[in-house]
Image: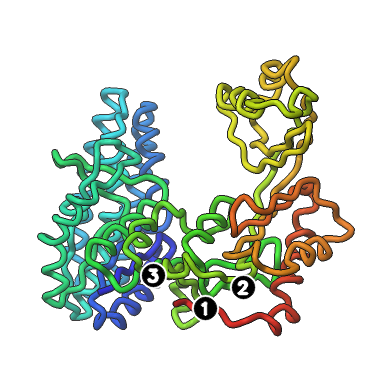
Amino acid sequence: MIVMKFGGSSVANALRMHNAADLVENAKHAQPCVVLSAMGKTTDALFAAAQDAVSAVLEAALGRVEAVFAMATTTTTELLRNPTPTVVALHAMRTDVETLLRGVALLRELTPRTRDAIVAHGERIATLVFAALLAERGLPVAHLDARLVMRTDETHGAATPLRPILRDLVQQHLLPQLRAGQIVVTQGYVGATTTGATTTLGRGGSDWSAALLGEAIAAEEVQIWTDVEGVLTADPRLVADARPIPVLSPAEAAELAAFGAKVLHPATIQPAVDACIPVTVRHTLRPHGAFTTIDPRLRTRERGGIAALACRGPVTVLTMTSTRMLAASGYLANLFAAFGQLGICVDLVATAEVSVTCTVEPEAPIERLTKALAGFATIDVAEGRAIVAAVGEGLRRSPGLLARAVTALHPINPEVVCFGGNDRNLSFVVRLAEVGSVMNRLHAEFFGQAARASAPVQEAS
């Protein structure tokens, strides 16, 4: 069995839905469980409608809902030979959403629970239409309400799935249908509390749903179908010849996400990683093209080179200096206690005999920090910087890697170099204006034609 999750761009209109249905039909032998996001920008529109309603702009809210369901109806009539039953079901859904919005406008109150009940309709619309399309193709399909199995806590808007209960419910409601040869179509992002209240899972919720269901059914693979050919070696907006990475470890994927790469949020795929299930990131319109496998079996292997580059900026560099730091126990604890009290998150840290350098987000309250550390340390502030990170398993055990990177950057001088905090990250702090040049220089060195010719073949297992 496999899980096939399709993102919003993959089901945004009739043509995209047909493409996704082709992929599902071609994979029917693998007993697919299909998880869908909402179509296109539907979720954004429903959030905006809810906000309009609580702001007493009911007509605008209803107008947004009308547009959402008009698009869904148009897609349905383009897709199906007999759209009438689905159109009738869509009309009933629209009535439900409008009733919720009228209640919000009347009370001038939008609770997280009501917001979830409104926005969850996006995924419900998508699965209703898609299941009908598969059925018209003569495929055995079961349209499953995710709220039957995706049991969560009561944190509306960012609910946490209750995995033991979820697994039991999957055994009852989902697995029997897969084992009977049916293609199960269900919603991502959507769940329900033990009392039946609709919840949503927050950022990356559909990917999380797919990984959780993959874990619960012991899937052979979780496929994430989107609009890119996997995870790329660098941001293509900065590096023109960036290309898909064949395989990543979960830890590498997490590092790349932390440093701004467009990659799956590591927490959302953790259930699949825990169950040692590969997660693949694939392009819906290029199903036979390149893709990336995030393979849990790569966790303990040494790649011995850079897998990808990522960058994040702007950041601010703080250098704190004090002769009191020399041979003083507890100094760093006291120093960073001030950061904690002010809620300042630190990214990179480098220490010397009497100074500490770190990077923080540009909106950090630097003036308040300076006052808090008055008499304890002086602070030099450098704004408009960025972090460029080279990520790969086993970097510290790659002979000459640091020398190659520094040589490739010449004549650019990094202001901070961090290497060794873990075995898979080499980070440089540079001026924000230098990021494009730094990324291209490093990419040419480690992924250019000469580098490819000498690189060993990487395997997924």
Residue 297 appears in view: yes
Q: How far apart are the alpha carbons under marks 3 and 2?
A: 20 Å
Contact, mark 3 vs mark 2 (Cβ under 8 Å): no
Q: Is residue 394 left or right of residue 74?
A: right
* Residue that mark 1 sits on: 290
Residue at figure coordinates x 76%, y 46% from the top left: 416
Q: State the residue in front, 312 or 84.
A: 312
Residue 285 position (above or below residue 85): below
The amino acid marked with disc number 3 is Pro
* Residue that mark 3 sits on: 278
The amino acid marked with disc number 1 is Ala
Mark nearer the viewer, 1 or 3: 3
Q: Position of residue 368 (x, y in %)?
A: 67, 19
Q: Is residue 176 left or right of residue 447?
A: left
Q: How far apart are the alpha carbons under marks 1 and 3?
A: 16 Å
Q: Position of residue 101 (x, y in %)?
A: 28, 35
Around disc 2, counting alpha carbons within 10 Å, would you say few (fewer than 14), some (14 to 19), or many (20 or more)?
Answer: some
**Of the residues under marks 2 and 1, which one precedes in the sequence?**
2
Contact, mark 2 vs mark 1 (Cβ under 8 Å): yes
Helix, strand or loop for disc 2: loop
Q: Is residue 159 left or right of residue 317?
A: left
**Of the residues under marks 3 and 2, which one precedes in the sequence?**
2
* Residue that mark 2 sits on: 243
Rendered-image quadrant of the N terminus: bottom left
